[in-house]
Structures are given as structure tokens and as C-alpha cells.
Amino acid sequence: MPKEQAGTMVSSSSECPIHRLPPELVFKIFDYLDLASLKSVSLTCHRSEQLFAEYCPRRCILCIAKRPHVPIVEHLKKAAKMLLRTKRTYRSLQLHVAKPRGNKNMQAALGQLLEPRLLQQLVVLKLDLAPDSLTFAAQLSDAVAHMDRLQELTIRSTVDCFSPLQFSELRLANRSLHKLVLGHVWPGVIDCPNLRLLEATASLDVETIVGKQYAQHGGREPHWKLNQLEELVIVEELCMALDMENRPGYKVHFFRQLTQLKRLHCNTGYISERIFQAIGESCVLLEDLSIANLHLVDPSSLRVLANLTRLRQLAISHSFKPIPLATIVCLPSLERLLLGRVVIDWQKLPNVQSLQWLKIKPYAEGVRQLCDALAGPLKQLHCLWIDFCYAMDTPTREEILAVLPTLPALQTLVLQNVYQLQFLKAMPPLAGLTRLVLFTAYEFEEDYTITAEVLAQLVPNARRVEIGSSKPLHDNVFTQPFQFFKSRTAFGYLLPTDHHSKWELRQYNHRYILFLRA
């Protein structure tokens, strides 16, 4: 073999194969590593350090928060110098803004940090505003207006208050902004033509306050331009609704303007019949509708849902009147239905083909109708979530479990508020189930007799079995890659005693889940 070829082969074999990977693929690998592992990788060679320097600002948020025993002005100046010297181009920034007492240099320090050259690369900006930061509203407004790549903006109050911070001088005008999150902060103007998602948390009636501008200005938007929104999430905390301006007409004006909405989540005091009708008549493009409290005088008003032909998910946490389920399941595109403290009228259900995902909280008086529905019109369900009522006795729960084998397409089962795992012995084996999730009502304090072998007999083909005592934070358990629980001790009682069992405990991000061994 010629020496040139031999030298080439030696050089090629000594090269690390990772160096030949494009940066985009390396970044995909980095997504699966925690921060400590990423730092270790960055120390292996110069190229890894360069890739880490480019990747880290995309994944991490640069947090410039108030530090104890350090003057805020000096802290901001050091952060500005670091940003001017660093080779990293940060795309996400979290900034604490507060007016220091007896210091007039805050505005200059904030100006250095919000220098246009540093802001051009920002994609995500999170501002924590204190009540005394009103002085810098105009400066922040100018900075937001010059961020040409900004897509997500979060503004939150740093103090818990019963009323939001009124920043009338804060004008949010940005052409690239796509998502806006407001936490107890009320800006004077929102003028973002590409804004598609708004999340507002406040201790006031958001729909009434915003709807007032439409009522007083003939449907125009002099302050908040929102008629282009596609997603809206409203959370009202401790809303007392004592304001004399709290008129239902203002809310109706608000929802009649949002004709482009595809996702609407209202965690508010209540949605009246008139407001619900305005949503059904105007927001006809809705695909996801979630209502915390529905107050209908006439349950037949639900017929307005027939206008929402694109609706794929409907969630109602509480209703003051029984809900005729037949009116809802007739929606042609409905796939997911989440019902909380709702009395359901199970009569005259059609054969439903589109509905695949159902969450219910059954009451004892309607268990027989529920079992008939699961064995008949709802037997095509793929996912079923049952939140057992606290007053429901064990025989009634076992009656519901006995009907589960009549669901031939059932793949995922969630049982919430389970008092004792022993009652699962009454559940017939579910060979088609691939995932089982159990939320117990209390912490694991007693030694349950049920073992992993018993679970293996009940769900022999399940690839995931998850058991824990913590309440799920959201209803979208199935969209999460893993569902975590608080108690590690819980799984100690479920672990097999012999090493030949199919079950094993795995650790993921310092949490513990019971998995079926492949």
C-alpha cells in the first residue's frame, strides 16, 4: 500500500465520527442531555465547545434577576458588559425591572442592557415588573418595538396583588410578536398585527374590561387589537366581580370580535347563557373550547354548539344544569370530551364514531346509564379517564370497572381518586390496554397487598403502568411524554420480589415510574 494512502487511512480512522455530523443533528442529540452532561461534552474539544456555545443560548434563558446584597444598577451594568463581550448569541432573556431607592442611574443601566444590537437576536423576552417600575414603561415600550425577531413576550408582576399593575404608559407594539403572556399586568396598548396567542392572568374580569372598548368605540380597537387572535387563555384569580362596569353586554362584545379563534380556554367566574351563545355564533372556527364554569338556564342552549363544526376538543369543568350529552357528541369533528363536576343526561345517545377520548366524573345515580353508554354508543373509545366521586361506594366503582371489557378499542385507561388499589382485583383483565394510569386519593402509607404480578395479569400487554398519589395538574396527561408523581415510596410496595418479573422501576429526571420491561 502506498505511504500516502496509508497516511490518509490513519488520519481518517483517528477522526471522531461525531465531528462529521452537521450541527443541526448534533443539536438534536443535545436536546436529550441535561445541563451537566452538556457542560461535560463542551469540554471534550474545541468544536464541541463551539457547538455548545451556539446551542446553549437556544435552549437556556439568560436570567438577570435581582440579587440580595447587590445593587440592582451594578448588577445590570455587569450583565450588559457580559453580553457585549460574550461570543454567545442569547435568544431568550428574563429581566427583573425595579426602581432602586435613591438611585438615578437605573435608567442609564437599563439603557445599556436594552441596547438595540443586543436585542436584535432576542426571540423570547420575559419581564418581571415591580410596582415601582412604572417609571421605565416608556423605555420598555421603545425596546419592545425595536425587537425585529421577538416571537414570545411574557410580562408578570413580581408581587401578589388583588388588582393588576396598571401600566397605561406601557405600549406593546411589535410586528413579529406571536405569543403574549400577561401575569397581573395591564398594558395601555397592545398593537401586534401578528399576535396569535394571548394568555392573561388577572384578578379582574378580563372579558369585560377589554369588551368595553368595543362597546364604546363602535367595534373598533383603539387600545387592545385582538381580533386576529387564534388562541386565547384567560385565568381570573380571586375575581370578586364587584365592579359596577361588569356588564354582560361588554363580554358579548368581546367574544363577538374574536372570529378567528381556534382555541379558547376560559377559567373565569362563569360563562352565562348569553355569553355562551355569543361564542357559538361568532367563534365558528374553534377547534378547542374549555370552560371552567358554565351557567345555563336552559340546557337546550347547548344546541348553539352545532355551529362549531371544527371543534375537536371540548372541556367543561362545572355546570349548574345537567348537560344533555346527545347534543354534544353529535359534533362531527369532536374527538376529546372532558367533563368535571357535571351531571350528564345519558339519554338518546347516537352511535358516535369521532369521539375517541372521554373524561368523566360519574355520580352514583347515573352509573347504570353510564355503563349502558360505554357498552353501546361509546364503545369505540380509545382513551377513558374516570374521576371517581368521593361519595361513590366500592360496589358502584366495581360496576363501572366490570363494563370496561366491552370497549374493544380501549388502549389507555386513567383512574383518578382511587382509595385502595385492592379494588382493582375486581377489574376484569384488559388485554387490549397499552397504558394504565392510577391516581390515588391519598399518600401511600399502608402496605397494599396488590403486587406487580397482579397488575401484569390485569393488563398483560400494557407498555406503561404509572401509579402515584399526586393530582394531575392538567387534563392533557396523554400529550405528555411522561407523567410524574411525588412519592418514591409508593413504588416500593409495587416492586416485584423476584428478578424474573417483567416490571421494573426506572428513574427519569429524578422521578420514579413503574415500567413494563421490554
Image: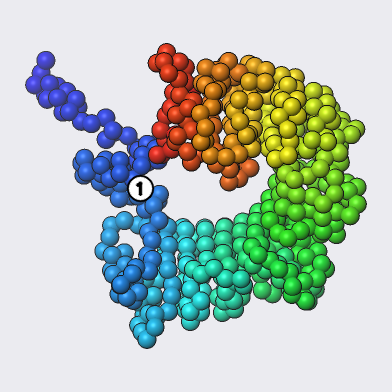
- The quadrant holding residue 379 is top right
Whether 40 is drawn above or below 505: the answer is below
Colouring scheme applied when the structure was drawn: rainbow
Q: Which residue in the rendered view is the most extreme toward the front?
A: 446
Asked whether, in this view, residue 400 is left or right of residue 368, the answer is left
Amino acid of disc 1? Tyr
Mark yes or no: residue 158 visible. yes
The spot of residue 87 in percent (x, y) is 28, 57
The spot of residue 197 in percent (x, y) is 61, 56
The spot of residue 77 in percent (x, y) is 31, 73
Q: Which residue is drawn at 42% across and 29% down?
A: 506
Is 389 or 219 nearer to us in this picture? Answer: 389
Q: Name the residue under label 1.
A: 55
Q: Which residue is drawn at 85% across and 59% down?
A: 274
Asked whether, in this view, residue 361 is left or right of residue 91, the answer is right
Is 430 or 367 nearer to us in this picture? Answer: 367
- The quadrant holding residue 456 is top right
Asked whether, in this view, residue 122 is left or right of residue 391, the answer is left
Q: Which residue is drawn at 45% across and 24% down?
A: 495
Q: Residues within 10 Å of mark 1 (few under 14, many from 20)?
A: many
Mark yes or no: residue 138 visible. no
Q: Which residue in the rendered view is the most extreme toward the left?
A: 3
Question: Which quarter shows the N terminus?
Answer: top left
Q: Which residue is drawn at 17% across and 28% down?
A: 14
**Numbered label tally:** 1
- The quadrant holding residue 69 is bottom left
Q: Is mark 1 on a helix, strand or loop?
A: helix
Is 57 or 326 nearer to us in this picture? Answer: 326
Whether 78 is drawn above or below 177: the answer is below
Whether 300 is drawn above or below 409: the answer is below
The spot of residue 181 in percent (x, y) is 57, 61
